Image (cartoon, rainbow, N blue to C red):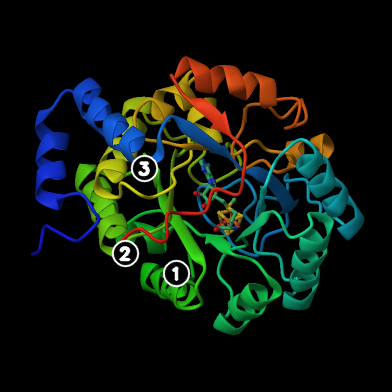
Amino acid sequence: MSTTKPGRGNWAEVLEWSRTLPLSEFKARADAVCRQHHGAGVWLRGLIEVSSYCTESCWYCGLRAPNSQARRYRMDTATLLETVRAGYAAGLRTFVLQGGEDPALGPELVAGWIEAIRHATNDEAAITLSLGLQSRQTYRLWREAGAQRYLMRFETANPQLFERYRPGTTLAERLRALEWLRELDYEVGSGFLVGLPEENQTDREAAWRLCWEFGFDMVGIGPFIPHPATPLGTTERPPLELCEQSVAAVRLLLPLAHMPATTAAGTLHPKGREAVLAGGANVLMPDITPIPMKKDYELYPGKVCVDESGLACLPCLDLRVRTAGKVIRHGVGSAPRRVAR
Ligand code: SAM
Ligand code: SF4
């Protein structure tokens, strides 16, 4: 099994460090690699949660179709564009459209949104989609309309756990869709949940390896937070350290990747985002969804910052970033083309 790839960390070396070094030292190495390639800058991405409808039944997610208590909304085009314009005026230059797998968000509707956002932002902003599994043809349509990036986590590298927690789909299917996205010249983001029930260290190491093999341009790693109205609702939250370790490992393996300090890390622990920003992460994704809607986009309970607009959060994020010895950077912040493959 090869342990080297150009432009990436040495697999065997990083694995060895993860097993032998104290977490603080492992994180310090990841931080040094992050600063070497990305400086002290932290890119901002404006997250817009466009629909809380979902046809899927993922065991971990509050938006799963069988959750009859979930409040459902679908953003209309005018609200979406108003949200983008406000973000643009506040200096944001990347917008991430995320949602459940909602058949009402048809290919043509989303393609129209992409074109309208490009117009509203004078073609100066990057458009990222995170709308789950779609056909290759749909991904192509959206790419041609002008979306540059796509985020879709593989969630777990353990195929049995994947099939249990995402019934009706397989890990292989998800990875094939990620390959399509790469072929279509998207900047491809993926990542995984840390701390799903029955996940173990071998599974996490397999997830690091998968990131390393694929060479994602962006990697989002967040802790699993149980939602009471799901089949995993009574399980334990993982310790933040597991998440910190995975972020540091993937940073060392993929020095060029963009890696967010996730809202879930900030929900798990008051200093969760700062902790991962100090150990490899270089992106923050303020949630700029209008307040009544973002409260209803409840993947897990207790999500931070749901009572204020994401734009009002910017000064607070600035402080958090400084606490980690970093500074916010404005701009499109494309992936250094690309994480060497
Ligand atoms: N529906 C699309 C998909 O599944 O790829 C995009 C939206 S989905 C809500 C975005 C991410 O939320 C998922 O990739 C998953 O990792 C995360 N998520 C869902 N439930 C979660 C939970 N209980 N705790 C932490 N993260 C969760
Ligand atoms: Fe739907 Fe995505 Fe939640 Fe699964 S993780 S239930 S696909 S929104």
* Residue in the image at 63% along x and 27% along y: 304
Helix, strand or loop under label 1: helix
* Image-quarter location of ligand 2: bottom right
The numbered mark, 3 or 2, whose residue comes first in the sequence reads 3
* 97 to the left or right of 335: right
Q: CA distance from mark 1 to mark 2?
A: 9 Å
- Label 1: how many residues lie within 10 Å, few (<14), some (14-19) or many (20+)? many
The image's mark for residue 197 is: 3
Name the image quarter holding residue 293: top right
Question: Which residue is disc 1 drawn over?
Answer: 178
The image's mark for residue 62 is: none
- Label 3: how many residues lie within 10 Å, few (<14), some (14-19) or many (20+)? some
Amino acid beneath label 1: Leu
Q: Is residue 89 visible?
A: yes
Is the distance from the Cβ of mark 3 to the nearest ligand 1 atom less than 8 Å? no
Q: Position of residue 194 (x, y in %)?
A: 37, 41
* Residue in the image at 76% along x and 62% along y: 118
Q: Is residue 283 above or below residue 137?
A: above
Image marks 3 and 2: residues in contact by CB distance under 8 Å:
no
Image marks 1 and 2: residues in contact by CB distance under 8 Å:
yes
Question: Which residue is disc 2 drawn over?
Answer: 214
Amino acid beneath label 2: Phe
Which residue in the rendered view is the most extreme toward the right? 78
The numbered mark, 3 or 1, whose residue comes first in the sequence reads 1
Q: CA distance from mark 3 to mark 1?
A: 25 Å
* 340 to the left or right of 221: left
